[in-house]
Amino acid sequence: MAGRCRQAIRSRDVNCQGMAGKTLYPSAIDLFAGAGGATEGLKQAGFKVVAAIESDRAAIATYQANHPEVHIEPMDIRDVDVPAFRAKLKVRRLALDLLKACPPCQGYSSLNRETADDPRNDLVSLVWPFIEEFRPRTILLENVPRLQHDARLRKLIERLKKFKYIVRTYVVDARQFGVPQRRKRFILLASRLRYKPMPADLLLSLDRTFFHRLPTLRSVFRYGRTKTARRDALHNRERFTTSKVRQRIRAIPVGGSRLDLPKRLVLPCHVDIGRNARAAYGRILLGGGVAPTMTTRCTSPSCGAFLHPDEDRAITLREASLIQTFPRRYKFRGSSAAIERQIGNAVPVRMAKGLGLIVRTMI
């Protein structure tokens, strides 16, 4: 037994009993890793993330600052030699416990006015070579709900079934996992462990303790008034401070939006769109319990309801990251715009943790 375990550890097969009977962490690889939101959540769920792939330089710097123990391939996933990647990691085929993938979702987003031919949509197809090479025990794919209607996803599911994977899909809202944010997501779970049934309801698969002491919007904004926040560089990066922007923000009442602006402060572009895009310059409401979806422009007042509930300012980068349930001490690298993009693109940490705990019950 001890010899088999030592061999498994060398090959990164961490789903193994140690000599003293202690269970080692199940293994995971994070594709399209971004700033590491999913990696952080999976680690909190008890996974050992052995590798990640990401192409954005600022996101890579953020990832490495928070997960230095994880091997990260800093390249476009299209350029990865998958067999060589597996050989480099010394992971045996069939040994990986979880392959997680969250391809960039902008091509499928309801905010995207382009056609289904958006080249970002092809990234879903690029997950398959990793599945074929690693043959992981389980697969987790996360994206926006519109992905479920795409022909490329149907093709991926057909391939999975031919490889004897059981596949189940879900549409969930991040707030169901205790994330203080409205964020609908499509989830695909696949498993080749046929002795363990797939969960019919993801939330019912979680232990009740997962829902104890949930983060709230009030706790997010209370942080902004603490001494720690005053020393937090990410909380104190002043943005959008022109006189005109400040005047607009001051003119928005609680629960209001750009529709409440006096004519002298209305943006010309808002005249053209009439009553569309009502959320612009909107204030986050504490009474509702959740924030709107954090986007790649989540600290930009003109791009949504991203104003502080009762202070005349937009939410800060740190507040946005806390709404995404990143830890308070999570380090971000890059320009303000780059960090804003990393936060908006991230899988909410708490949702990733919940999904990781569900996968652990399957393996």
Image: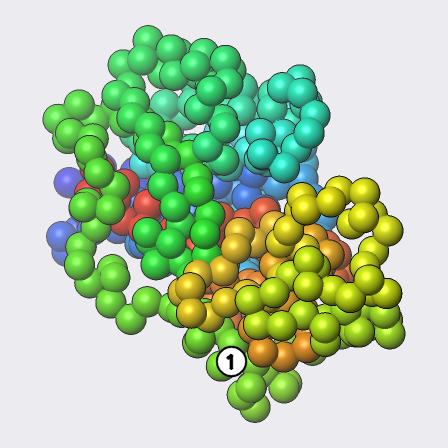
Residue 359 in view: yes
Q: Position of residue 81 (x, y in %)?
A: 60, 24
Q: Position of residue 220 (x, y in %)?
A: 49, 73
Looking at the rendered structure, the kind of residue marked 1 is Tyr
Q: Residue at x 68, y 29 (%)?
A: 113
Farthest-out residue, front: 263
Above or below, 240 against 207 in this view is below
Above or below, 55 against 307 in this view is above
Q: Position of residue 225 (x, y in %)?
A: 56, 86
Q: Residue at x 21, y 26 (%)?
A: 193
Q: Residue at x 58, y 34 (%)?
A: 110
Above or below, 116 against 173 in this view is above
Q: Quadrant of residue 6?
A: top left
Element at label 1: helix
- Nearest the eye: 237 or 248: 248
For label 1, count other residues whose C-alpha is less than 10 Å away and answer few (under 14), some (14-19) or many (20+).
Answer: some
Residue 59 in view: no
The quadrant of the picture occupied by the N terminus is top left
- Nearest the eye: 290 or 342: 290
Which residue is tagged 1? 223
